[in-house]
Image (cartoon, rainbow, N blue to C red):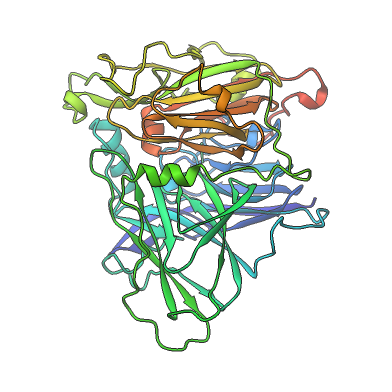
Amino acid sequence: GITRHYTFDVRMTNVSRLCGTKSIPTVNGQFPGPKLVAREGDRLVVKVHNHMTHNVSFHWHGIRQLRNGWADGPSYITQCPIQGGQSYAYDFVVTGQRGTLWWHAHFSWLRVHLYGPLVILPSRRSSEGYPFPSPHREVPIMFGEWFRADTETVISQALQTGAGPNVSDAYTFNGLPGPTYNCSSKDTYKLKVRPGRTYMLRLINSALNNELFFAVANHTLTVVEADANYVKPFTVDTLVISPGQTMNVLLTAATSPASQAFAMAVAPYTNTQGAFDNTTATAVLEYAAPTRPPSSNLPLPSLPRYNDTTAVANFTTNFRSLATAHYPARVPLAVDRHVLFTVGLGTDPCPSNQTCQGPNGTKFAASVNNNSFVRPATALLEAHYRRRYAGVLTADLPTAPPRPFNYTGAPPNNTFVAHGTRVVPLAFNASVELVMQGTAIQGAESHPLHMHGFNFFVVGQGFGNYDPVNDPPKYNLVDPVERNTVSVPTAGWVAVRFLADNPGVWLMHCHFDVHLSWGLSMAWMVADGPLPNQKMLPPPSDLPKC
Ligand code: C2O
């Protein structure tokens, strides 16, 4: 591989959307941020200069960062944030991965504006290129959210009042809301296609707090990759994508299209009882060589209802690894550690000097096994590397639920959570089976869980309570999909397996930023292996200090 250098100048820039202008953090003045391209095996050096007064750090979402957590990016986990006026070079090699990933800020909620695609092409040595016919063109499409309000206002509203989050005012395609919103016709994303050609859409859900349905009127979508792992191709009219997930889909343009243009649309999938942004954003698929001018009112593709959990479950069961000799599914067959986590919302008592707007006058919180994760004041990875844990870690996180859960009956009386910087230590190369059970304490809601440092295999999932006797025999250990983000279904569970072959400290969290801030997070602390090439690399000299 070769070394590719990128520079990220992070500064505040005025951007206008929805009839208003606000100053937002940007990379090199661009929103969304620049597309990074590499080949499998390449080394990437991204030099970040923070010209803001605000802290920042960047995460290369889905990159495994083997032995090299120093480049992973979550603030206070693998590094202290890059303070205003400071610089840091993220230096990493893309090993054994190819496909669509993305990068985003990993400090507070800054990723609402700071995100971009990270495209990894197959290595030149792999003669076959893609395991499907090469598309005519490849196009990244990032879904996002736009808030009219200033981001600080949105964050403090969610963290201080104890209520649900301020909802966004629009969804976006590559930063553009499109004609369903006021003042936005000029801010419409357009994809131009030629009749009969096939396009690969590199879809990325970079929205803050919403899973999304996506469809293109009169066109089907063939899914070929999920989270930078090839899957057995399957074709759908509508797909669902969770925040943090990426998906490559093939779209073949009609040879004699019924119209010159068609609408593409995204709308939320949610079961949240409270308010959410229930708007639909549109973009345009436009054929070259116009036969007649496109009508200004394109018919929308039909999307499932916002709470259509059946549609989501039907879509999700389609995913299978390619599992060929060339792209084997390396799912661990034996398990060393069984871990069961409850994931969901809970509450905190309201501080006496405050009025809280959460359930029964409490403050919302979120937890893993009833622990709401507390961000430490210094980076966990450095503490781990130097074996200096005192004052940084609270205790180990329990690997079985400390309280009974039952999503089907009444929620447990006591929904209050404990708080701590709790991690699960793992031996090097331990093979782990992790079952994540949604608790639905505050109404049924799904949680897109993202793991740093690893991909995992999704071996099973279902609704209701996980059954340790009857569910495991039904696991798919042959061709389960390999991903880095999986949605724990509404009032259900999901089982994944992974091999702890990457020493370091790796965050796992809900990719809804509001749930992450409320504490739906934990970290795996993986020990070094015995061999020199199984140990963490030393920290870079420019690693930021807290
Ligand atoms: Cu894409 Cu820890 O996040």
Describe residue 245's horizontal placement relative to residue 177 as left or right. right
Q: Nearer the viewer, residue 49 or 263?
A: 263
Q: Is residue 339 left or right of residue 263?
A: right
Determine whether, in the image, residue 470 is placed left or right of residue 476: left
Q: Residue furthest bottom?
A: 291
Q: Residue at x 83, y 54 (%)?
A: 125
Residue appearing at x 33%, y 27% in the figure:
440
On the image, which quarter does residue 476 sit in? Answer: top right
Q: In the image, residue 276 lies at what x, y percent?
A: 27, 45
Residue 46 or residue 43, whichever sits in front = 43
What residue is shown at x 18% (from left), y 18% (from top)? 352
Say whether residue 53 is visible: no
Q: Where does residue 198 sit, x and y in percent of width and height?
A: 60, 69
Where residue 135 sits, quadrant-wise, is: bottom right
Q: Is residue 247 above or below residue 106?
A: below
Image x and y of residue 523, in percent:
53, 24
Q: Nearer the viewer, residue 293 or 257?
A: 257
- 533 left or right of 255? right
Can you give x and y, in whole percent of width and height, for residue 475 in the image? Answer: 58, 28
Residue 484 visible to the viewer: yes
How many numbered markers are drawn?
A: 0
Is 234 situated above or below 485? below
Identify which residue, 115 or 335, lies in the foreground.
335
Q: Quadrant of residue 390?
A: top right
